[in-house]
Every structure is written in structure tokens, then in C-alpha cells.
Image: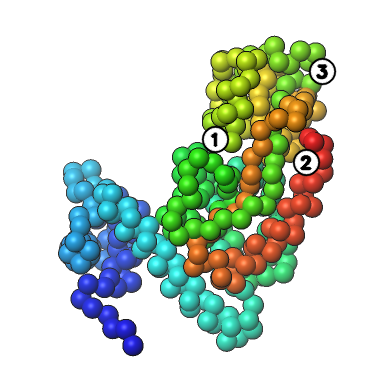
């Protein structure tokens, strides 16, 4: 049997690391944990000694994780989540075998609006013991997959196939391929002549090559960080935009949607989780409902845009 050693971090030490990272200060972390500040400082110093690296930069404004600290905190979140899962799944197996407990989901805005509601409805109906918690994250930089890598989410609805590789320890699977379309004021006879309303999340590698080859796309005159704001601006006649199918679900009648042709860009949407959580009952239950519900919910829209 494996034995713990003096270099092993205890669960409470992991909780302290996460609390300091979340609170941004030792004093605030101590208050959140119900400990003294000196106890938190002592715990962090002990963790740093065991790991052999400085985990937090201390300063007048608080404590911020170093690069080593970012790694340590991300792993601490994932280990603590696995400890929670161990308890919940063992109890569930001993009682009824039903999936139960919290399920943390990260999703980008359009997926949270148009994919998740029917999925969560079915999930709650079939698995009333599961408690889904959804967090909306912009799909830029590390995006929703980064939430899983950092231990802040159990599963992410994410865009797949971009230039950034999947972080180590994560697994992904596709759900749908959504096409991009030209979006413009309804009834406009020459939408390609309109100024561009650009959406910040359109900068992914799945559109970059296609975008660079289009000499008709002007430099953006308006930039928006929210796809709903883009549609509102287009609807009001301020320009045209190029957007993926999920963002166009439920678009107003004042918005026209034009096919970009056979060479149009597409965006692959799927889910991301960790190798450890992929086998858990709550994640498996969500995957089943995603695979059963997504085609049913999205096929009408994809057929309309195809």
C-alpha cells in the first residue's frame, strides 16, 4: 500500500491554495476558510516548501499566483473536485446507483442560450439528483476549455479544432459543425457593400484563412464583444457581419441571413472534460443528453443555413 510522505499535500493545504488564489489575499482567504491569517500563511509556506517553488507573489495589494502557483492551484482544484466526486459517486452507488451531485458546466454565450436549455431540461427530468451549474465564458484565449483545465468546470461546451492545442489532461469530442453566414439588414439588395460590424470571437483560426482570402470584406468600422450586440447593430442598419449558426438562432425578422457558398467557414462545437471526470456518472449523463438533444435542437437551424 502506498504511504503518504512529508512531501504530500493534504486536502486542507489544497483548499488553502485555492482560497488564496480566489480571494487574492491571505487575509480574505483566512476569512473565507474560517482560519487565522497566520494559519493560512503557515499552510502556504508549507506547501511551497513541499513543492519547492514560490506559489504566490506577496505584496501590499494582496497575493497573486506565480506561474508555478497557477499550475499548483489548477491541479489543486481538480484534485479537490475528484475527492468530492469520490464521495458522491460512492454514496450514489451504495444507495441507488443514480447519478447525483453538482455538475459545473462552462459554455460560451450562444451555446448557453440555444444548446443547453433543452439539454438541461432532459437532464433534470432523467437525473433529478444532478445539480447543474452553468457559467458563461467568452470563447477567446483559453476559453471554456481553460475553465476545465483550471479545475473551475467539469465540462465545457467549446469550439474545437482551433490553432491552440487542447491543454494536457483534457479530452474532447465533437457535437456539431456550424456554418458561418453573411448577416445583414433584411431586404438589403447589396449586403456585401455594407460596412463590417466585427465580432471579437470571429478571430479564431477556423475563420482566419477564409477571411484573409475575401477581398470584399472591409476593415471593421464597429467592433462588438457580444454576438447579441452584433445582431442588434445589423438589425438597425449599421452594417453587415459574418457569424456562426448558433449565434443566429432566433434572429429577428429584421435580420437577413445569406449563405456564403460552398467554401464558407465552419466552426466545430463539442464538449471538453478531463480524463478523470470523463468516466464519472454526472459527466456521462450530460454527454448522453447532449448527443440526444443537440441534433434535434439544431437540425432545423442548420438546414435553414445550408
- Check disc 3: other Cα within 10 Å, few if <14, some if 14-19, many if 20+: few
Q: Secondary structure at mark 2?
A: helix
Q: Quadrant of residue 236?
A: top right
Q: Earlier in the sequence, mark 1 or mark 3?
A: 3
Write down the residue under mark 2: 302
Gap in Å between the C-alphas at discs 3 and 2? 21 Å
From the viewer's side, name the closer residue of 155 and 42.
Answer: 155
Quadrant of the frame with the C terminus: top right
Q: Earlier in the sequence, mark 3 or mark 2?
A: 3
Residue 231 on image: x %, y %: 67, 28
The mark closer to the camera, 3 or 2, is: 2
Write down the residue under mark 1: 205
Mark identifier at residue 11: none
Residue 199 on image: x %, y %: 58, 28
The correct choice, above or below, for 132 with respect to 264 in the image is below
The mark closer to the camera, 2 or 1, is: 1
Residue ID at (56%, 15%): 219
- Check disc 1: other Cα within 10 Å, few if <14, some if 14-19, many if 20+: some
From the viewer's side, name the closer residue of 169 and 155.
Answer: 169
Residue ID at (59%, 61%): 132
Quick check: 278 left or right of 268?
Answer: left
Write down the residue under mark 3: 187
Q: Secondary structure at mark 3?
A: loop
Quick check: 42 left or right of 222?
Answer: left
Q: Quadrant of residue 99?
A: bottom right
Amino acid at each position: 500500500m502506498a504511504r503518504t510522505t512529508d512531501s504530500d499535500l493534504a486536502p486542507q493545504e489544497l483548499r488553502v491554495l485555492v482560497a488564496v488564489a480566489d480571494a487574492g489575499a491571505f487575509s480574505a482567504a483566512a476569512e473565507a476558510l474560517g482560519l487565522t491569517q497566520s494559519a493560512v500563511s503557515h499552510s502556504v509556506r508549507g506547501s511551497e516548501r513541499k513543492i519547492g517553488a514560490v506559489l504566490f507573489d506577496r505584496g501590499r495589494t494582496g497575493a497573486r499566483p506565480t506561474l508555478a502557483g497557477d499550475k499548483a492551484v489548477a491541479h489543486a482544484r481538480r484534485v479537490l473536485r475528484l475527492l468530492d466526486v469520490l464521495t458522491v459517486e460512492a454514496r450514489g452507488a451504495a444507495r441507488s446507483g443514480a447519478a447525483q451531485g453538482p455538475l459545473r458546466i462552462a459554455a460560451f454565450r450562444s451555446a448557453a442560450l440555444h444548446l443547453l436549455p433543452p439539454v438541461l431540461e432532459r437532464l433534470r427530468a432523467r437525473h433529478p439528483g444532478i445539480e447543474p451549474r452553468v457559467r458563461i465564458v467568452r470563447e477567446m484565449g483559453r476559453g471554456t476549455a481553460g475553465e476545465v483545465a483550471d479545475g473551475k468546470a467539469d465540462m465545457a461546451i467549446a469550439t474545437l479544432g482551433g490553432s491552440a492545442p487542447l491543454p494536457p489532461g483534457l479530452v474532447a469530442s465533437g457535437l456539431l459543425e456550424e456554418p458561418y453566414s453573411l448577416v445583414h439588414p433584411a431586404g438589403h439588395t447589396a449586403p456585401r457593400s455594407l460596412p463590417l460590424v466585427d465580432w471579437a470571437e470571429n478571430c479564431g483560426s477556423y475563420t482566419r484563412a477564409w477571411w484573409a482570402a475575401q477581398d470584399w470584406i472591409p476593415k471593421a468600422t464597429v467592433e462588438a464583444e457580444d454576438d447579441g450586440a452584433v445582431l442588434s447593430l445589423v438589425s438597425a442598419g449599421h452594417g453587415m457581419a459574418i457569424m456562426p449558426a448558433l449565434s443566429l438562432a432566433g434572429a429577428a425578422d429584421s435580420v437577413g441571413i445569406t449563405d456564403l457558398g460552398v467554401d464558407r467557414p465552419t466552426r466545430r462545437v463539442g464538449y471538453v472534460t478531463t480524463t478523470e471526470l470523463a468516466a464519472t456518472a454526472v459527466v456521462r449523463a450530460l454527454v448522453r443528453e447532449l448527443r440526444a438533444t443537440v441534433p434535434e435542437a439544431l437540425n432545423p437551424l442548420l438546414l435553414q443555413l445550408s
